[in-house]
Image (spheres, rainbow, N blue to C red):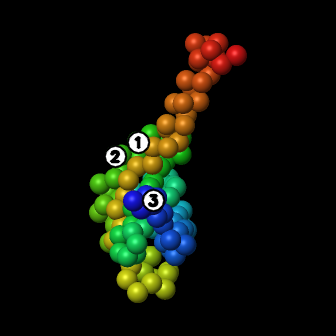
Amino acid sequence: MKPSRKPAGPSQRQLRVAEEIRHVLAAVFARGEFRDPDLAEANITVTEVRIGPDLKRATVFVARLGRSDIDALLPALKRAAPFLRAQVAHALPLRHAPDLSFQADTALDYATHVDALLRSPEVARDLD
């Protein structure tokens, strides 16, 4: 019987390209160059980009610092995806710019919830 292998994680190239895409998108969001009024004034943070092994599809995780209404902006981000893909294509020397899909990053909300639970009197009593 062969020993089971762990599934391989992302390659170094995937990690590097994903990080470069994150930087490009973060700069675009910082400049606020959107015609869409839903995105023009929105303060969006790109927290992570995950890209597939073939570098053709990328999932962009976004959040709004201090606000939890990022889900309302996902349709606007979907509409802006072709523009954002073009920005990535111009900025990075890739053979093909990846298709971009957007997801809300809920990690910060979850961490805040866990922190609040740990600070609650019931849990703090059990931890001491």
State the SS at label 1: loop
Whole-number angstrom distance, CA of label 2 to CA of label 3:
46 Å
Q: Read off the residue under disc 1.
A: 69
Residue 23, given in percent of the width and then of the height, sits at 55, 68
The residue lying at 42 percent from left, 81 percent from top is 89
Query: Are the residues tagged 1 and 3 within 8 Å (C-beta)?
Result: no
Left or right of 52? Residue 66 is right
Q: Which mark is residue 123?
A: none
Q: Read off the residue under disc 3.
A: 3
State the SS at label 2: helix
Q: Is residue 48 placed above or below 121 in the rendered structure? A: below
Query: Are the residues tagged 1 and 2 within 8 Å (C-beta)?
Result: yes
Q: Callout 3: 10 Å neighbours few (<14), some, many (20+)?
A: few
If the image is split into quadrants, where does the N terminus sit? Answer: bottom left
Q: Quadrant of residue 88?
A: bottom left
The residue lying at 31 percent from left, 61 percent from top is 78
Q: Amino acid at mark 3?
A: Pro
The mark that comes first in sequence, 1 or 3, is: 3
Left or right of 77? Residue 120 is right
Q: Read off the residue under disc 2.
A: 72
Whole-number angstrom distance, CA of label 1 to CA of label 3:
46 Å
Q: Nearer the viewer, residue 113 or 127?
A: 127
Q: Callout 1: 10 Å neighbours few (<14), some, many (20+)?
A: few
Residue 73, given in percent of the width and then of the height, sits at 36, 51
